[in-house]
Amino acid sequence: MRILLVEDDPAQLEPLKTALTHEKHIVDGVEDGMTAQWLLSRKSYDLLVLDWMLPRVCGLQICRQYRAVGGAAPVLMLTARDSLVDKVSGLDAGADDFLSKPADVVEFCARVRALSRRSPQWQGDTLSVADLKLYLNQLRVERGAEGTQLTKREFQLLEYFLRHPNQVLTHAQIEQALWEWEMTPESNAVTRLVRRLRQRLDHVGASDWVETIYGMGYRLIPRT
């Protein structure tokens, strides 16, 4: 998943970002609300993790604005405010879950996994489309009796395709989904990555599932 993590305390931000990255997520970690607003206006995320108390623009305001423009990704609020009134305010603003600060990394990752299960393709610890299964904890894809291991980046691309089946995804969308906001991939990075993923999928008889839409991008089309 692509996750926006907003936390103004580096002592909290870095271990949480490291934990999410270790679990194969693509993470944009920022320390202030205005940068978070800027990113949300330019990128799509599968999950938002927002510190309630932030400099300049608070997490609650970001959440409220995100929902007001139709943002549908789950929102996890990190907060030292645990009164019933505060939680009601957060829920009314559009938050889905709360975690008290300082956040325990193990519990934090468990909350993220729980929120990620809201994907319609989620089945246990796998994402599935038709008979193709991606094992989220193993970087492994299987179809029928065949299976193969993926690199981290190949895994991230296939996960992105599986969360958006039958949709045309442009080069720009794929770049935004797979590379952190401060990184600039090489001009042919997406093309090379798609080629490598097709080679991996050939091991399970699914190389033709990733269709090139010339002049636009790529689309995952389930085949029988």
Image: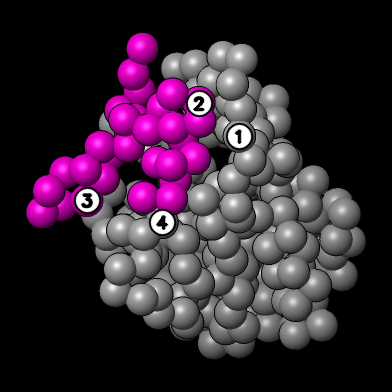
**Callout 3 secondary element:** strand
For this view, does 71 lie left or right of residue 113? left
- Whether 198 is drawn above or below 196: the answer is above
Residue at label 2?
204
**Callout 1 secondary element:** strand
| Magenta region | 195-224
Select label 3 or label 4 by which is in front: 4
Q: Position of residue 100 (x, y in %)?
A: 83, 61
Residue at label 4?
193
In contact (CB < 8 Å): disc 1 and disc 2? yes
Q: Quadrant of the C terminus?
A: top left
The three-letter amino acid code for the residue at tag 2 is Val
For this view, does 85 lie left or right of residue 190? right
Q: Earlier in the sequence, mark 4 or mark 2?
A: 4
The three-letter amino acid code for the residue at tag 3 is Gly
Question: In the depicted view, which residue is nearer to us: 134 or 201?
Answer: 201
Q: Earlier in the sequence, mark 4 or mark 1?
A: 1
- How far separated are the C-alphas under marks 4 and 1? 16 Å
**Residue placed at 46% from the left, 79% from the top?**
183
Label 4 packing within 10 angstroms: few (<14), some (14-19), many (20+): some
The three-letter amino acid code for the residue at tag 4 is Leu
Residue at label 3?
217
Q: Earlier in the sequence, mark 2 or mark 3?
A: 2
Residue at label 1?
148
**Callout 4 secondary element:** helix
Q: Earlier in the sequence, mark 1 or mark 2?
A: 1
Select label 1 or label 3 by which is in front: 1
**Callout 2 secondary element:** helix
Label 2 packing within 10 angstroms: few (<14), some (14-19), many (20+): some
The three-letter amino acid code for the residue at tag 1 is Thr
- How far separated are the C-alphas under marks 4 and 2? 18 Å
